[in-house]
Amino acid sequence: MKVFKIQENGINMVWKVADTGCVRLLHFSALPFDERTIVDEYEEQGFKLLELEAAGYDRPDERHGTKYIVTAPGYRMQYADHKDYRNETGRKLEITTQDQESGLQAVNHFQFFDGIAVVRCWCEVSNMGKETQTIQYVSTFNLNGVEKEGLLSRDEKIRIGVVHNSWQRELLLQEYTLPEVGLQNSQVNIPIRSSKAFELTNTGNWSTKHYLPMGYISNTETGSMLFWQIEHNGSWHSEISDLTNHLYLQISGPTDIHSHWHKELKPGESFTTVPAGVGAVTGDMGAMAKELTSYRRAIRRKNKDNEKLAVIFNDYMNCLWADPTTEKEFPLIDAAAKAGCEYFCIDAGWYADGFWWDEVGEWLPSDKRFPGGIKEVIDYIRSKGMIPGLWLELEVMGIKCPMVEKMPENAFFHRFGKRVYDRSRYQLDFRQPEVIAHANSVIDRLVNEYGVGYIKMDYNIEPGVGTEVDAESAGEGLLEHERAYLAWLDGIFKKYPDLIIENCSSGGLRMDYAMLSRYSIQSTSDQEDYRYYATIAANAPLGVAMEQAAVWSYPKSGADEEETIFNMVNALLLRVHQSGHLAEITDVQKELVKEALDYYKTIRDDIKTAYPYWPLGTSHYDDNWSALALNAGKKQYLSVWRRGGSDTQTIPLPQLKGRNVKVRCAYPQNRPVSYLWNEEAGTLSVKLETAPCARTFEIECTED
């Protein structure tokens, strides 16, 4: 028996090679390990480093149901070797285990990042035997005992944080107790063998159509928190349940049961799981968000967009609604330039004479919409000092697209021997060379012929579990397609490093860090009501670094001043996605838009290095008041929204308690608002006399 203890970046990790040869992950926490929390061998045997399931092997223990516990040959895997070294990122731990009967070998990777309390985890499985093995499940990260710290019962102290997500209702955090998710302790001092798990799962290509691929488990007694994000753009799975008297967390990519995935691993072949970031802190949501934000900045592609935070105008939302023409665009371009926008993106419809939905795929401009050619409009955008952009949905072809008949049959997803349809579109398969050639030719044409510097890359279908073409399982076909798409993206950014491509999937339905480690900017929603967008804006830093989180601001013609201000406040601490018909709004509204954009340009250098926190807690759609704060060192920024209720709200800022600070209403500067800083209490009282109403405050610490 040998025990290994790691203390790195505030994380305490303990793993053990048992006398049986099994490797056990005993501890992963911001708190130190207390050996007394695992009372005997029965409990400890549930602390497996890895769960690995292959077809044809018995799973002899526990009532697993559909849970991925006591997997075979996972429960037989024996220690073979390990490496503990440093690379350019930080400390790196690799633990190798193997099973003699199946010939399967696994390497669990744990990549630390200097100064960040998050570890990137993945597992590589290789077939070292003589027979093909059918893999049905591999855990990316597996930890038992997530509840073991403290004296209270787990039902009293454990909370599970889930970020619900759906079209126009993105980024809604909900916290649950164990009884609320059906995991209430039903036996005291008797082993629990529950068949139920609390599962957060995605099946299909819209990776965040139900939940963001992240979550946390907090301990209200000890103040400790375990959190994670799965970095995959397709099917993924996580489960929380009980095992050997403890509570475990297990996360992975696609699975056999949940996403129709299996992989035939021939002798000499390997399979690597999707990665995940797993972190541990003590403190509140702000402590977790700080580490996640730092980690997200560390793993993403280095790019100029996340340094500059350019202001983008897009003509879609509450504006042209995918009906662009030369006549409509020219006044919008003039107005956007006067407001201070730096990019101008023409959204959907530019390639179709009429109804544009089912014709997507060829990506040639409509002469009817643009009689002088689309290049005329693009050149006009550049003449006004802005960089032009176009909307694409490159992963699909509409059923009426002329190119459909020119593509080979295997270019499309198939199931049951038929093409997969969804919303009058076919899904293209990026494993196929003809698809890659088509995608490359479109990007080359937009960049080199049209002079486009910005692409809004949308995705509006869900093709289901995957494709049977050239795959052992539909889920494997989907996984390989998604990995091929990411590889294609890597090639595009290598060829065009300064090209900005926005990640959009009906708003935020693929808000994951497989995509966002490549893309520099993410559409957070298609929410059309600015009042409810405040909740999405306030919560956006949960899922996306602020400098990547694009939020619509769309003041409407005929709206009053407060509606315009509210719209602008929605985006001010994130990325501005300006829209609304700026050519038709009043002069006062135009002044308010320009004031906001001018102010944004003075603070965007702080946004890209700041960390978020939520003085009133994360926002819900029925909240009367919401608030998002950014800590940028000597300066802090606070956006406050009122949708109803009392006209006065006290906002706690405990980290500034007792400090001499200077508070000002930064936007708008010349509209009435009452506020008072209470140094002794560390609170800011704000009075907003109308509803809806919003303001952005700047708080400067005047002492070290």
Image (spheres, grey):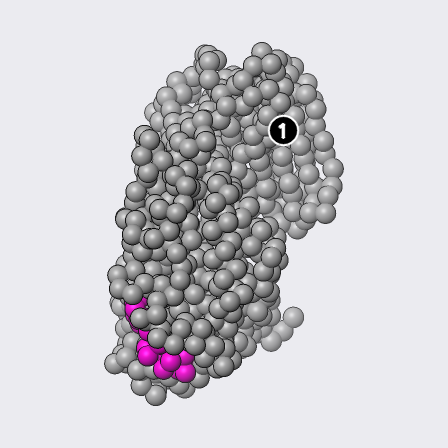
> Is 358 positioned to the left or the right of 257 in the image?
left
| Image position, residue 586 (x, y; %) | 31, 86
Q: Residue 206 or 171: which is nearer the viewer?
A: 206
The residue under the point 56% across, 14% down is 131
Can I make out residue 156 in this image?
no
Can I make out residue 123 in this image?
yes
| Image position, residue 564 (x, y; %) | 34, 77
| Image position, residue 479 (x, y; %) | 47, 37
**Residue on which the image places disc 1:** 107
Q: Residue 291 or 316: which is nearer the viewer?
A: 316
> Is 158 positioned to the left or the right of 272 in the image?
left
> Is 192 positioned to the left or the right of 224 in the image?
left
Q: Main secondary structure of the magenta part?
A: helix
The residue under the point 28% across, 48% down is 423
**Disc 1 residue type (three-letter):** Val
The residue under the point 41% across, 38% down is 410
Q: Residue furthest front?
A: 406
Q: Is residue 446 magenta?
A: no
Locate residue 463: give its quadrant.
top left
Q: In which quadrant is the C terminus drawn?
A: bottom right
SS for dot 1: strand
> Is 319 positioned to the left or the right of 262 in the image?
left
Q: Residue furthest bottom?
A: 587
| Image position, residue 626 (x, y; %) | 37, 63
Q: Is residue 326 magenta?
A: yes
Q: In which quadrant is the N terminus drawn?
A: top right
Q: Which residues are magenta?
A: 317-336
Locate residue 339: give its quadrant.
bottom left
The residue under the point 59% across, 30% down is 124
